[in-house]
Amino acid sequence: MGGTDPKVLHLYDAADVGATLVRYGRRQHLPWRQFNTVPPADAALLPDPPNGPGRRARRLLAEAYWQAARAAGILRADLLHVHSGSRLGIVRSRPHRPFVLHFHGTDIRTQYYDPARRPVLQWGADHAAAVLYSTPDLRPHAQAARPDALYLPNPADLEELPAWAPAARPRVVFASRWDEAKGGAAQLDTAKALAAAAGPEVELQGLDWGGAAGEAAALGVKLLPRMPKPQYLRWLASAHCVIGQSAGILAMSELQAVAIGVPVAMPLGEGFYPGPSPVLRGSGPGELAAQAMAALADPAGTSAKLAGRAWVQAHHSPQQAVARLADLYRGLAGSRQR
């Protein structure tokens, strides 16, 4: 199989989607690799005087090394897979290769409608061999840029997930950052309703991340600093219930919580996901608070009824995503040869 498959270089990442695809692709002996090194930034260099010769020399050396590594990776590839429209600069300069553009969220949902950013994103959509999007809410935006854009569900790596281990004290975790991209105002309303319903015996936790984090803290949510992925996953696994983002989609954090087995309460966009629902659905703060309280009364029973891990395996497995991508890549390679 490997002899007929194009060599693909995944450029950058989003929520470890690229890393997961490459890891599982290589298990299938597919010639996929990843380049996830960003251009060197001034802030990362050793502190010389701002215009000192040592600082300039290190910057030039770091930039030359990065450019060489980038060019070498691209030259070895038949096809590039760019994660996020905000990273298109890497394929606009030489050496050139055909590329797949993969939208992951804010890039196409928000940046595409910014007049200053739209030309680059539209250039990417116009010149890409194929365009993908990662969550079903992105469909109208991605297809506005490219009518034949395809939905590739995010792959959730079940092997990296810890066992569900709820804390001794009842705990509800807000998995998302506190901003409008995640339905921030509605999430704050849910926190307020849950604080009133749960009382002091239930611990509410969230991330100290996002413009409205201070408001969440004022409502009684204990904020934790952003943390490395393994620690974040253990934190999700410590919850008796997780509140998913109010934007109505299963982003990676929600998929991970569902697959761990934690009951997740959140709204879901109508028609976005195949049934049965893997989450406790609610259309507003009061309903979500009630669903969370019901889950706290019987977390294990609620988890068993939702059967979230089996649902994620059926609809968001890395193996499925790899198979779909491999077929897409082969088709693109074949069309170029004809």
Image (cartoon, rainbow, N blue to C red):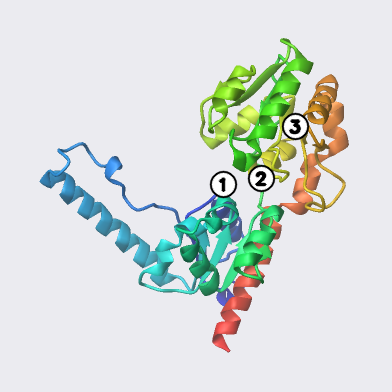
Residue 165: quadrant of the picture:
top right
Figure check: 253 above or below 336? above
* Alpha-carbon span between mark 2 and mark 1: 9 Å
Which residue type carries mark 2?
A: Ala
Mark 1 Cα-neighbour bin, 10 Å: few <14, some 14–19, many ≥20: some
* Alpha-carbon span between mark 2 and mark 3: 15 Å
Figure check: 50 above or below 119? above
Does label 2 or label 1 sit earlier along the sequence?
1
Q: Which residue is mark 3?
A: 262
Q: Are marks 1 and 3 in contact (CB under 8 Å)?
A: no
Which residue type carries mark 3?
A: Val
Q: Residue furthest bottom?
A: 338
Q: Which residue is mark 1?
A: 15
Residue 334: quadrant of the picture:
bottom right
* Left or right: 50 in relation to 206: left
User: 253 or 195: nearer the eye?
Assistant: 195
Which residue type carries mark 1?
A: Ala
Residue 298's x, y, as percent? 85, 22
* Left or right: 107 in relation to 245: left
User: 301 or 206: nearer the eye?
Assistant: 206
Q: Are marks 2 and 1 in contact (CB under 8 Å)?
A: yes
* Alpha-carbon span between mark 1 and mark 3: 20 Å
**Numbered circle sitting on residue 251:** 2
Residue 338: quadrant of the picture:
bottom right
